[in-house]
Amino acid sequence: MVAFDVNLSTGRWPFRPHLHQTMDLLVPHLARFGITGGLVRSSQAPFSSDLLHENHELAKACQPYDSFRALPVINPGYGFWRDIQTQAVLLLPSFQNYSLLDGRTLDMARAMAKNGHVFVISLREEDERSQHPLCQIKPPTADIQAFAEAVPETPVIVLNALAGECGRWSAANVYFDIAFYEPFRITESLQAAPKGRVLFGSHAPFFVASAALSKLQSGLPEADAQAIARDNALAILHP
Amino acid sequence: MIFDIHTHNFKGQADAVAAAAIAHGIDRFLFLGDVLRYGDQATQEQIRQVNNETLADVRRYYDRCRGLCFLNPDNATEFVVEEAKRCLDMPEFIGIKMEICTNCRSTRMDPIMEILEERDAILLHHSWYKATGKHRFESDPADIADLARRFPRVKIVMAHLCGVGIRGVEDVADCQNVSIDTSGSQPEAGLVEYAVERIGAERIVYGSDAPCRTFGAQLAKIREADITEAERRLIFSENARRLLGW
């Protein structure tokens, strides 16, 4: 199976190092499992105040790898969002202390939606129970539906949602990945999920990459598995 | 061979867990009981009910399954001792499971530990380092280390490598009677490698925590780990077989 992974990171996560935290280590590691492309965000961006620098470093890190696309972070408080060239952009509202439903955020989102951007929102990077005790990030789960309704023609890709959270979003433009999605009856659950709106995401190098693949290899029909592994993502992301 | 030391036969789910285990190539597994059904203060009657259900569930899969006896040390000591002996006298039970009823630093653990020492049976104890959502009596790895030092001849399996993290491994590093199971939380990368490097593969055992988690994702933690094949075999089965004598 060939997979396109919408949930990859590179760079040093502030709280612990990861084995494959640089692209030269991550890309060959992913290739072992058939993950040949994806969206890559910066592990340093969530807590950085210099987002342009992080985006620049991310673009440099991804540049040698054609099928791994840099996912720059935007923030309504930083005006550079108007100059962003990539189709997909990352929002980290809880990490960067703004709301998805602020007027300024929605103005930015509507303007970017008109220009054909796709939004990616990371709800969390770690299990909340394991976060640093002085750095407790609350996922903006409750705001996803209203945000998606504000940009109804634009895909909103939600990363690292729990299975119980995914059921709360009925908006047809909300997509979610399977990195944190782990109900015991995984195959039945994926088959019951909205067709076309489940994407492959491993959250490597935080998580072992093959864990997410295993969720597609536990009895899911091959066509459904391939749709999640790659086709659903490529249907909304430009080549 | 794959030996899963940590699955739960929650009410009505034992058959589904067993079927999924078999489908994923798990050769042997332990049922740890429906240990959270009655919260953190299960009564004597509730404890006995959970253990009787485990007994029935194990009997249906006895060719590949054994159970652990669930206890609440805060019940009357006479009952705790009687229930431990009742279960361990049956071949279906090969150890004791503790959840969150009593912090394991409590001396109420002592009679149970004495029985385990006498019978050379294991204690599998829940543990986690939580920044949020910690239960009032929940034990963390420092508590487990305290218990292990008080009873150095009792074989303890500290649950949830991915819940205790690096700090948890460090807490029990010098407690040679403590092994760690790989269950808990998401399939975080690098922790198996860290634990193998720090305390040795001989003290790591595979556990899934199914049906709280999926077998596939939890197996991937071990299959993908950057360790030797010999270390992988130890974690997948050889250590559990040595600890349990089965």
Image (cartoon, coloured by chain):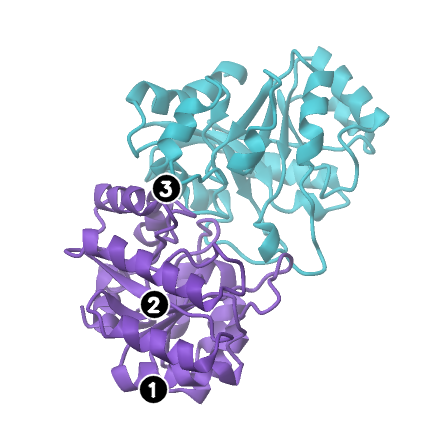
Mark 1: secondary structure: loop
Identify the disc placed on residue B153.
1
Disc 2 marks a residue whose amino acid type is Cys
Q: Alpha carbon of mark 2 to alpha carbon of mark 3: how far?
A: 34 Å
Identify the disc placed on residue B69.
2
The answer to whether the residues at label 2 and label 3 have Cβ atoms under 8 Å apart is no
Name the residue at 72% across, 11% down.
A114
Q: How far across and down, in percent of the image, does residue B169 sit?
A: 47, 70
Mark 2: secondary structure: strand
Q: Alpha carbon of mark 1 to alpha carbon of mark 3: how far?
A: 38 Å
Q: Residues within 10 Å of mark 2 (few under 14, many from 20)?
A: many
Q: Colour of chain A?
A: cyan
Q: Nearer the viewer, residue A182 or B61?
A: B61
Quarter that holds the N terminus of chain A: top left
Q: Residues within 10 Å of mark 3 (few under 14, many from 20)?
A: many
Disc 3 chain ID: A
Disc 3 marks a residue whose amino acid type is Ser
Q: How far across and down, in percent of the image, does residue A39 sit?
A: 53, 31
Disc 1 marks a residue whose amino acid type is Arg
Residue matched to label 3: A210
Q: Judge if badges 1 and 2 mark residues of a common chain.
A: yes
Name the residue at 35% across, 44% down.
B12
Mark 3: secondary structure: helix
- Give above or below for A166 relative to A136: above
- Give above or below for B46 relative to B85: above
Chain displayed in purple: B
Disc 2 chain ID: B
Name the residue at 23% across, 50% down.
B26
